[in-house]
Amino acid sequence: MNLSKQDFDYIRQYIKANCGIALKDDKKYLIHQRLEPLLKSYQIKSFSELTVQLMRNLSTKLHEDIILAMTTNETSFFRDRHPFDTFENYVLKKFKEDHQKQKGKKFRIWSAGSSTGQEAYTIAMLIYEFVEKNKFDGITLDNFVIAASDISTRALNKAKSATYYDAEVNRGLTVERKEKYFKKVDKHWQLEKHIRNMVTFYQLNFMDSLSRMGSFDMIFCRNVLIYFDQNTKKHIIQQFHRMLVESGFLILGAMENAHNESDIFTPVRIGSTLLYQKKGFQPQIKKRPSALNSFAKR
């Protein structure tokens, strides 16, 4: 299908206005790649016809499917591994030290842009294992709150069902964790209920106010900000800063950084992982080898 400059400009402005994703001039191919199959399924004959439909706002479902197509990101359990090693070996250990000083302390985590749930459930598995190891120190699952959000209702529905294909559970999970946390249901694998229940999912658009999510000790927002322009990134990161408690951590994707926000975040290198810590707290790091609210929808 031909995509004229006029249609490309309108469609990318529509996408930016509705979900914040900024498509540069060289991203014409991405519109083709993501939306052409959608046009065929809707029997829309051209991008010009799509533009007319969007202008007339004829279909809410079409709108949702366009946003879904443009915001679908690759995800997997334990993606890139090292951020989760850092979470397990540094962040949770720090929580244990804090818990010994302040019994009953809650640790709140947000997986922002959680897609189909693998990141949030990875965090849940690690917390479950941490609690198993430290239950005699008075640490329980009640000490932790895990929130996860995404713009896509379809992605959230899959995340809530916690049902995955063979290829999805075989990517990133060890055999031991697969056997411990999943059961085979027909041709799929379903996550055990006690892990599912540790995560609460929310529908959230990064273009809206994020403050309704509340405050957090740690925010995971990995491989999301790369899709936004610089001003939108800055606005989102500043909102994260306001939502983090003192000494709270932000972790971004490998191709993302908050270096331009050095006045509000201190970069902390832990092995291969770069954390951003809310300023006002100086972490004590031992050298080591590199290596939620009423609108929740369950």
Image (cartoon, helix red, strand yellow):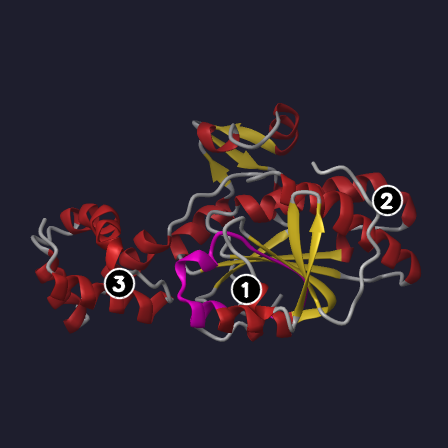
At 66% from the left and 25% from the top, the residue drawn is: 176
Residue 76 visible in this rendered orientation of the protein: yes
Residue at the spot of label 2? 135
Residue 52 occupies quadrant? bottom left
Amino acid at pointer 3: His
Residue at the spot of label 3? 63
- Disc 2 element: helix
Q: Which mark is residue 296?
A: 1
- Disc 3 element: helix
Q: Where is 27 relative to 210, above or below?
A: above
Of the numbered discs 3 and 2, the one sitting upstream in the chain is: 3
Q: Are marks 3 and 1 in contact (CB under 8 Å)?
A: no
At 37% from the left and 55% from the top, the residue drawn is: 71
Q: Which mark is residue 51?
A: none
Decide which of 260, 146 is in the foreground and name it. Answer: 260
At 85% from the left and 52% from the top, the residue drawn is: 96
Decide which of 97, 122 is in the foreground and name it. Answer: 97
Q: Are marks 1 and 2 in contact (CB under 8 Å)?
A: no
Q: What stretch of residues is rendered in magenta?
A: 214-233
- Disc 1 element: loop
